[in-house]
Image: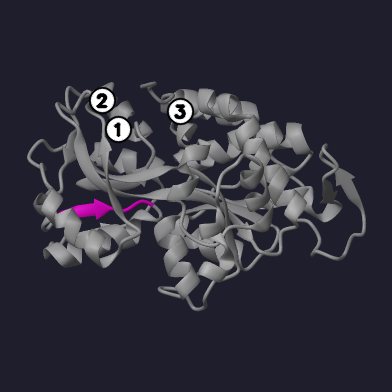
Amino acid sequence: MKKMLSLLLSGMLILSLLAGCGTASPPAPSGSSSGSSSAGGGLDIPDSYTLLNTASGSSGGLWYTLMVCYSEVLKNDTGISLQCEPGGGGTANMNAVGVDDHTFGFTNNAAMYCGMNGIGYDQKFDNVRTMFPLYPSIQLFYAVDPNLKTIYDLEDKIVCLGPSGGGVVNMTLQEFETFGIHPREVVYMAYADALTALKDGTIDCVVDAGGHPNASVTELETTMDRVSLLTVPVEDMEKIHEAAPYYSVFPISADLYKSLDEDLQMLGFYSIAICTEDFPDDVVYAMTKAAYDNYDTIVTNVASAKDIALENVQYMYGPMHPGAMRYYEEQGIDVSAFDPGNF
């Protein structure tokens, strides 16, 4: 399997691709402009949807890197520009997308379920629709202390869960509660800052959920003989799955990290691209098509994006936008299970 670009190369990638991200003011509300443009193939792209806000992940994180890369191919193919700004993570992004019909974002199956049902939110975001899968976000606990070996070793430790709105937050807090683990403190910060804090010893462990290899861990492995990748007993993960079926157990291949001697089984959930039901069908069709037409380019720059593949559409959770459904049906994929009437 291909190794993901190092943080340095990821930073260079972001700088080189920022030209694909819009910098103008947010578009006017739908209906304020009667103009439209063509993205090819007879598609009608309203002018008010040629510049979109985004909700991705923290600076230095995989979601942000992927959003920047996708923005470049999207602009080239459709003329649609994305304002690439760091986002708050899966949980926060459900709110960001749900309240703005000009925001395109990334979230995950767990946050989608909670948002649709108003769990942990002030309202139900049943207007949010899925577009295409990104990759399975697989949880990873990493530390520099060799004495930290399992999740149970986090008792009375300082644990960082990334940004406060990240998709890993609810999962990890649910694990701590279910397993009776009591960290001394749970803190929140961007993963780039968390990596620095971990090296400085001001926190004991970082918990992330994303594609693999994880850039922070591979950076640590360049300066350390071995990074502590904490395990969770499989039978304990099954307890979480029974209570929250949108979580699944995924393998992390040992060949992704020099710190692993064998595959690591961890909880995870699929990350997905989302918008609101108010996005025009042709806009969503064009955006979905651009992801697949430029699959090779995206994967070359962001290795974890290989799971955008059509065969993984089945792993998404939530109602699908009609524009995306139209694209998949043209590819011969049955997406009837994602009809909004089924949720």
Q: Position of residue 20 (x, y in %)?
A: 70, 34
**What residue would you read off at disc 3?**
303
Amino acid carrying mark 2 in the image: Glu
Please rate how many residues cluster around mark 3, counting C-alpha atoms within 10 Å: few if below 14, some from 14 to 19, many from 20.
many
Q: Nearer the viewer, residue 271 or 14?
A: 271
Q: Which picture quadrant has residue 253?
A: top left
Q: Position of residue 240 (x, y in %)?
A: 22, 61
**What residue would you read off at disc 1?**
217
- Look at the image and tell me whether residue 84 can be seen: no
Q: Position of residue 110 (x, y in %)?
A: 39, 60
Q: Nearer the viewer, residue 203 or 41?
A: 41
Q: Nearer the viewer, residue 202 or 118?
A: 118
Q: Which residues are magenta?
A: 157-162
The answer to whether residue 318 is left or right of residue 24 is: left
Sooner in the amino-acid sequence: mark 3 or mark 1: 1
Q: Which picture quadrant has residue 250?
A: top left
Amino acid carrying mark 1 in the image: Val
**Contact? badges 2 and 1 (CB < 8 Å):** yes
Residue drawn at 50 percent across, 50 percent down: 272
Mark nearest the camera among 3 and 2 is 3
What label sits on residue 221 in the rendered view?
2
Magenta-drawn stretch contains 128: no
Above or below residue 205? Residue 257 is above
Q: Secondary structure at mark 2?
A: helix
Q: Secondary structure at mark 3?
A: helix
Which quarter of the rendering shows the N terminus? top left
The CA distance from mark 2 to mark 1 is 6 Å
Q: Residue furthest left?
A: 147
